[in-house]
Image (cartoon, rainbow, N blue to C red):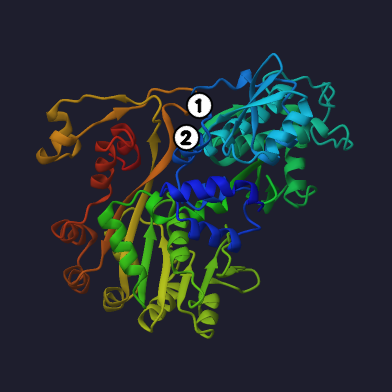
Amino acid sequence: MAVNSQSILLRRLGQAGLVDSNQVQRLITEKNHQYHSLAELLVTEKLITPKALAEAAANITMHSMIDLDFYDFEFVPEQERNEKLVRKHLVLPIGKRNRTLFLALVDPTDMQPVEDFEFSTGMRAELIVVEYDKLQKLIDRVFDNNLSESFNSSEWDLGALGVEEGESEDSAGSESEDQPIITFINKMLHDAIRKGASDLHFEPYEKSYRIRFRIDGILHEVASPPVALSGRLSARLKVMSRLDIAEKRVPQDGRIKLKLSQKKSIDFRVSSLPTLWGEKIVMRILDSDSAMLGIDILGYEEAQKKLYLAALEQPQGMILVTGPTGSGKTVSLYTGLNILNTEETNISTAEDPVEINLPGINQVQVNIKAGLTFPAALKSFLRQDPDVIMVGEIRDLETAEIAIKAAQTGHLVLSTLHTNSAPETLTRLLNMGVPAYNVASSVSLIIAQRLARRLCSHCKAPEHLPETELLKQGFTQAQLPTIKLFKPIGCEYCTGGYKGRVGIYEVMPISGNIAERIMQGGNSLEIAQQAQSEGINNLRQSGLLKAAAGLTSLAEINRVTNS
């Protein structure tokens, strides 16, 4: 990272007390290969917020600052859309007048990008300071929009796509004939990433074909290509995933790595399934950034966060994360592992599949056909002196017994189960056949969780409900004066009034009284009552707190907590 030209900004930020210059210099030395600019390092390492950085840079250099949230990207000059220069320098022309080009940038003290644009366009540059994250989003929107315009999925020309009317869907074209298919699929993948989708569904039917993205947990149809393209679409996806394109009778699993930039790539886990009308292909997006979010971003209440961190600090015991598929269990586990991932700690994981690569952690891919099962992996781990063990899922009694034995003999064990609440997790282990004394003595913390859609900050509107209805929903009389409910509206920045998701948690430590209930053969209802008496919020109560804080809507809490 070349920062000599940016030393002025760094020095002035240090003088203003906005960043610790010594810490920044250390990070520059340690992470020289990771970041292209000082601004990228400052924001990514969370040393300063994008808004504070932009305000400071504007004040230091006396340049104007604008909020790109209120800028129409269609005003970006067509002839000056040099994508190579824009992405290299993270500088975007946002307007021109006569021979003056207005450049949006983050660091106006770095003159190299300015000189490159002035040389490329022959125009004089006027600098406009903007926020780092908003500039990145605008750049992606500008150039993704260009791709969208060149391949409009709502106007399909089969001839232009190399498909004749009545042609067999299984026919394979040449590479040049398939170029429009390649372009379209690439556009779908980039669109899914840009929109924050968690998975893509390519679905053939008798007389139609649809493509859906799952955004914030909800499926939305985004394209409906001609059914005649079904074979070519599935063939291209299978080629990208290194699957057998000739085999269409049995399910297959594969992976795709999509490189977005020199330092950023996204993995897709791909599953093909033979259906009545062709192969349905589902692609799950595995973004390693989600595993590095940090516990403060996940949505834990302060007391819940302290309980999780306290359990992670213990030298032994078992932490269980529970919830349905897609509830964020993996991210919670990986967040815990990242906290524990130090030079002094030996961490091993057994996963099926390994979704995200975690440097510094020994990850094992379970392979049942080869005999590498969860129990086999756990037995091997225990011969390699681990400090921390993560088991992707406790599915059977054998896995549970080995994991509990490890937790009782000086190891910290993290794992997941598919249960609806923290108390039900304990009864699930008992029903598997694990003795009650082993459950009571080994499990230290259970986290049950859901993901709720977060209200869009641009368009959410206040929602007023009578007190009787609020009490009926589960709020207490003491909460009523502080409740500020909002409802979704919908705007250009969101999907149906929601953008992103926030975690809702039930974090239950195994106290002495709860352990006693377990030993007495108490059911999940009795354990839940004991947890309530100890001040532990269940999922519903935690969700109501998120709604009262304006983070999500009451309707969304009702959806995810089944109320």
Task: Pick the residue in front: 300 or 189.
Answer: 300
Query: Residue type at mark 2?
Result: Asn
Q: Is residue 334 above or below residue 162?
A: below
Query: Residue type at mark 1?
Result: Ile
Crowding around mark 2 (Cα neighbors within 10 Å: few <14, some 14 to 19, many 20+) is few
Q: Is residue 155 above or below residue 483?
A: above
Q: Position of residue 21 (x, y in %)?
A: 49, 56
Task: Pick the residue in front: 323 or 330.
Answer: 330
Residue drawn 82% across and 21% down? Answer: 165
Residue drawn 84% across and 21% down? Answer: 159
Residue drawn 20% across and 34% down? Answer: 483
**Sequence-earlier tag: 2 or 1:** 2
Q: Is residue 130 left or right of residue 533?
A: right
Q: In the picture, residue 546 is in which quadrant?
A: top left
Residue 401 seen in render: yes
Report the residue marked by disc 2. Answer: 59
**Residue 66: which numbered mark, if any?**
1
Crowding around mark 1 (Cα neighbors within 10 Å: few <14, some 14 to 19, many 20+) is some
**SS at circle 2:** helix
Q: Position of residue 179 (x, y in %)?
A: 82, 33
